[in-house]
Image (tube, rainbow, N blue to C red):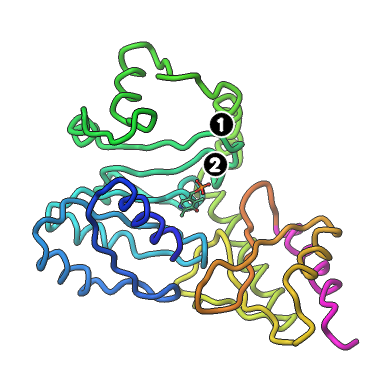
Amino acid sequence: GAYGARMAEIAGYLNISCETLAPGETSRPSLDAVEALLQRDSDITHLAVVHCETTTGMLNPIKELISLAKRYNKVVILDAMSSFGGIQMDIGEMGVDFMISSANKCIQGVPGFGFVIAKQSELEKCNGLARSLSLDLYAQWKCMQDNHGKWRFTSPTHTVRAFYQALLELESEGGIEAREARYTENQTTLVQGMRSLGFAPLVNEELHSPIITSFYSPTHSDYQFKEFYNRLKEKGFVIYPGKVSNADCFRIGNIGEVYPEDIKRLIIAVKQSMYWEVV
Ligand SMILES: *Cc1c(COP(=O)(O)O)cnc(C)c1O
């Protein structure tokens, strides 16, 4: 998906050679293909993988991929941007070396910073390796270690406060387990409601995340995303355009302070916004 492609793009900008395995946006990578690549190219040092591919809504089989990478002694980088805090995972047990996420997705904080949970022994190896001054993770960590949590450059004070508040709210909701259950109920309510209106999800249910769902766009010749989007927006709902190369889709996210009742209201709004339907 697009976020996997972005990883390769980032590597390209930084002159980090990388091999990409792109099995197509709606299917999971084959473990055999990953293993064959690891065997073929012994220069590979790291494996980077997206957990929830936010462009399609698909979940990658990270447990299997990480355990494979670990059998070959690779350092693992996990992009858990749109899953950490909303989907239970044990990154220690899986053996993730660097888990990257942000304040404003499943943690439900405000935008402003990203964070990394790293295996300290791996992080220590990064001393002096950064290709960017401001994105030097090791230097950031060292500064915090040596100065009682001080940020290296101007601290994002308000977003950190908001993050703290978001963590309290996550706790009072019942933790990640409860949040995952709510997101899952949101997502199944969404898919059920959308199906009843004739919309089909792009990704098979068994590969699906509880975070965001891509739906095929209506094939009716009167349908235009922009018009549909505007009508929904007038009713208080904002959806996303599709981000899949081989299919015409739109996306609906269901994370944040959103409950199944909100999804039900959304389904009514969608029904009222289907201006292309002959009524
Ligand atoms: C949101 C997201 C990112 C990056 O987010 P930006 O807000 O574009 O910096 C990266 N990977 C995944 C899987 C995401 O969902």
Q: Residue at x 43, y 64 (%)?
A: 59
Tell me, yes or no, whether the highlighted magenta stretch contains residue 276.
yes
Q: Residue at x 50, y 63 (%)?
A: 209
Compare residues 125 and 72 and report the one nearer the observer. Answer: 125
Compare residues 84 and 155 and report the one nearer the observer. Answer: 155
**Does residue 268 sit above or below 223 in this rendering?**
above
Tell me, yes or no, whether the highlighted magenta stretch contains residue 203.
no
Quadrant that contains the N terminus: bottom left
Judge the density around disc 2: few (<14), some (14-19), many (≥20) Cα neighbours within 10 Å. Answer: many
Residue 205 coordinates in the image, percent (x, y): 51, 75
* SS state under label 2: loop
* Residue at the spot of label 1: 163
**Does residue 166 sit above or below 105 in this rendering?**
above
**Does residue 276 sit above or below 211 in this rendering?**
below
Kind of residue sitting beneath label 2: Ile
Distance of label 1 from label 2 (alpha carbons): 8 Å
Magenta-drawn segment: 260-279
Dot 1 and dot 2 residues touching (CB under 8 Å): yes
**Does residue 113 sit above or below 255 in this rendering?**
above
On screen, residue 187 versus residue 35, left or right, reads right
Q: Residue at x 44, y 19 (%)?
A: 153
Judge the density around disc 1: few (<14), some (14-19), many (≥20) Cα neighbours within 10 Å. Answer: many
Predominant SS along the magenta part: helix
On screen, residue 141 versus residue 276, left or right, reads left
Residue 47 coordinates in the image, percent (x, y): 24, 55
Q: From this viewpoint, which residue is outermost toward the top? A: 147
* Residue at the spot of label 2: 107
